[in-house]
Image (tube, rainbow, N blue to C red):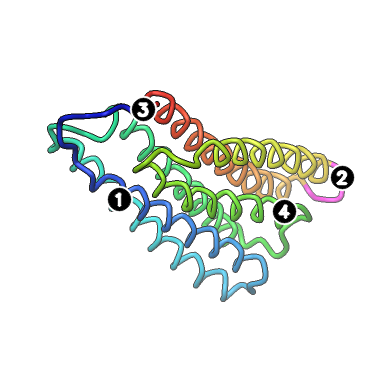
Amino acid sequence: MRFRLTPRETSFYDMFAASADNIVTGSKLLMELLGADTAGRAEIAERMRAAEHAGDDATHAIFHQLNSSFITPFDREDIYNLASCLDDIMDFMEEAVDLVVLYNVEELPKGVEQQIEVLARAADLTAEAMPNLRTMDNLTEYWIEVNRLENQADQIHRKLLAHLFNGKYDAIEVLKLKQIVDVLEEAADAFEHVANTVETIAVKES
């Protein structure tokens, strides 16, 4: 790591960690969704909406700190990108839950559970990685594993699409379910974007 003589604003590390912890909360709500009945899903959607609002607040706090800080721990553009990508994950997870409730989906197709399990694992890894931004240690394994998980998510997504188009569902149901699994896939992509941004930061700081 480069040696610096100038002091830097370090509260960003805590704020990134808080954002990632909130994403873990969102991933746990997704897991709860799998076994919930209609009433339970509505309650989970409310809790997810609250978590998404908390994520927005955390992102805005990072942007405010960024605009008021003279010296930042790493490039301003990277801070902005990392905060935005973390926010995207929460947005996609909240959208998926909301769609399940709005479309009154009775049963999610086989494979969605695997999608959510991948997201939960990526959320845990991301939360574990954020505190390491302080030292830039032990991050290589993180972005390698998240990229592997995203590849796994791609495979699950393609199999889900094949399942949806196998003729067992009516056209309207296919449209509803496809939108849900597509949004979950976007969440997986967003985790990869976070990992790629962390890799970029680590390379610059090495």
Does dot 2 land on a helix, a strand or a loop? loop
What is the three-letter code of the residue carrying label 3?
A: Glu
- Cα distance in 3D space between marks 3 and 1: 19 Å
Label 3 crowd (10 A; few <14 / some 14-19 / many >=20): some
In this view, the residue in front, 121 or 54, is 121
Q: Position of residue 152 (x, y in %)?
A: 71, 40
Q: Is residue 7 left or right of residue 24?
A: left
In 3D space, how far apart are the residues under numbered discs 2 and 3 (Cα atoms)? 52 Å
Which amino acid type is marked by label 4?
Gln
Q: Earlier in the sequence, mark 2 or mark 3?
A: 2
**Secondary structure of the residue carrying numbered label 1:** helix
Q: Which residue is mark 4?
A: 114
Residue 124 position, x and y percent, is: 54, 55
Kindly identify the residue that appears in the image at 49 percent across and 72 percent down.
Answer: 43
Which residue is label 1 attached to?
15
Q: Earlier in the sequence, mark 4 or mark 3?
A: 4
Camera-side residue of 90 and 127:
127
Q: As drawn, is 70 to the left or to the right of 109?
A: left
Q: Note whether 127 is above or below 143 in the view shown.
A: below
Vertical position of residue 29 compared to residue 151: above or below: below
Q: Are marks 4 and 1 in contact (CB under 8 Å)?
A: no
Decide: marks 3, 1 in contact (CB < 8 A)?
no
- Relative placement, left or right, of 137 versus 65 is right
Q: Which residues are magenta?
A: 166-170
